[in-house]
Amino acid sequence: MSDYSTSELEGIARKLRYDVIKMISQAGSGHPGGSLSAADIVTALYFKIMRHDPKRPGWPERDRFVLSKGHAAPILYAALAQCGYFPSEWLSTLRKAGTCLQGHTDSTLTPGVDVSAGSLGQGLSVGIGMALAAKIDKKDYQTYVLLGDGECQEGQIWEAAMFAPNYKLDNLTAIVDYNGIQLDGFTKDVMNLEPFLEKWRAFKWEVIEIDGHDMKQVIGSLETVKNIKDKPTVLIAHTIKGKGVSFMENNVDFHGKAPNKSETDIALKELS
Amino acid sequence: MTNYADLSSREAYGKVLVELGQNNNDIIVLDADLSRSTMTKFFAQAFPERFIQCGLAEQNMISIAAGLASCGKIPFASTFAVFASNRCFDQVRMCVAQPKTNVKIVATHGGITVGGDGSSHQAIEDIALYCSLPNFTVIVPSDSIETVEVIKTAITTKGPFYIRLGRPKTPVIYNKGCSFKLGKADILKDGRVATIIATGIMVAKALEAAEKLSQSSINCRVLNMSTLKPIDDQAIIEAARITGAIITAEEHLLHGGLGSMVAQVLANNMPVPMLSLGINDTYCKSGNPEELLAIHGLTSDNIERAVKDVLTRKIVK
């Protein structure tokens, strides 16, 4: 927990978005859209909500964060560098040979990354394991899992969705970055998830719908979650793919494409 | 005190987990609706707070196990071998193999001796799949007593393990005790004419065959290759050097199993005449275990004949 004001947090989110564009541009490949849509949520978690210590990445009492949508690795790396888990110079090595910052997260290489991801649909289950360990050990840490909306087409998400309420995992929070776009197009066209909230409710989750770019709402809902007992909570965060860069917003092309030189210049200018 | 010699390997697994769970609170057991068959039910009864019933959701189970391991637990995830390998392979790859999480996957009902359930339940690809994964240790114990030692070793050795057990009760090899050493083949019988390398239930059949062969003065070395990964290269090379002929026997597809791995070691180091017994590129059918083994050429008679065959190709110096 830190004392950042809402406007300070918004400033951090803008800085992280700036880093994301720079990193992906330097790498020459990557997924800008889903990092930008998740920027405010990741900022809220790492700079306001979560109990963690960059000097002790393995601290047993830390809150856990699982980036299940592993292609959004750049936003997590930007946040971890900003927190001080590793030097910010590392960010320019993204995706390059010998780097500790792999294209998708690798728990064996990056300080502060607890879970390797990239094959979608598995992070909620891993988060369940962490939440169960907390219950067994009577520890009070929280586990947060960030899911993509397209990712929720994977069957394993619903295996996990069935499991967590059965085990009353009130120390587990899923956050869906509902940006409405996946690689092949709009989620509603590729494989519609709706009625989405009803699905989670039917699986007996506490469901909270928020604007994933309204920092006050993001913080407020994450605070509320801590008081919900006997069941897990899912935050359905409505977001905009590519948020913060005009020509990337709601643009399917920037799910998995790096900006070129001139696009990068415009994007960085918009985020400065 | 449990007498493990009286039990099937899976019963021994279930019982030893309870014994070890008494002094180790980090042991957590997960199952996917098969605890009455995998025998994790004993642990569920003894330590309900450390038993996690996942229902029929093997993918979820493996990833949950990885999450538990990342928090310092020693999770044992059990289901049938056919599901533990095929059904959740990507979860095993992503959550266990690549990040080297301390997850122990103990699969029962391996091979064709599942019997009547038929091909859907007969794991014949699992060894090839698990041995293909970097960072994994893969073990097929030969009897219930070795199973107990293997489980103890899995607990004290960090990293991903796949341990394959069978369904039926099988002959006891290690009546006089077992000093299992991870990654080391065990010479059960020495001889200089040929070497039979076997794994799992085929070890007992290899000993039977060697006994019969020795009556006609064909003295074979018998190696129990319970650790398939990392495979004991030195024991294979040594056997080739001393005996000059190798026969392998396994309850698994020939592709990617013990025979393939031994052949690779020999080809790279010390090529000698070799013959592999295993399932030849086919799915199997229902039947009782011994019938099925006979259909697929996996009896002690088959091993005996294989030794004689390979000896006709042996180069005598």
Image: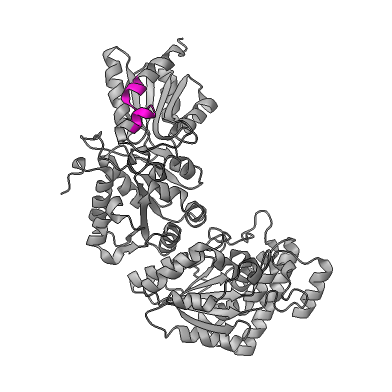
Main SS type for the magenta part?
A: helix
User: Splitting the image into 4 quarters, where does residue B49 fall?
Assistant: bottom left
| Relative to B236, A240 lies left or right | right
Residue B302 painted magenta: yes
- At horizontal 65% and vertical 81% (from top left) the residue drawn is A12
Where B283 falls versus A158 (above or below)?
Answer: above
Residue found farthest to the left: B1
Establish if B118 lies above or below B64: above
- As drawn, which residue projects farthest toward the right? A262
Left or right: where B65 falls relative to A154: left
- From this viewpoint, is residue A47 visible? yes
Which residue is at 42% across, 16% downward? B309
B79, above or below B241, in the image: below
Where does the image place residue B178, in percent across and percent down from the top left? Answer: 26, 38
**Depth check, front residue: B270 or A37:** A37
Q: Position of residue B90 (x, y in %)?
A: 51, 53
Query: Could you say which is closer to the camera, residue B191 or residue A259?
Result: A259
Q: Is residue B188 visible?
A: no
Q: Position of residue B300 (x, y in %)?
A: 32, 24
Q: Nearer the viewer, residue B217 or A98?
A: B217
Q: Name the one closer to the observer, A232 or B94.
A: A232
Q: Which residues are magenta?
A: B292-304
Tell whether position A189 is magenta. no
Instruction: Find residue A172 and report its image quarter.
Output: bottom left
Above-or-below relation of B208 to B58: above
Residue A124 in picture, x, y percent from top left: 48, 67
Residue at image position (28%, 48%) is B13
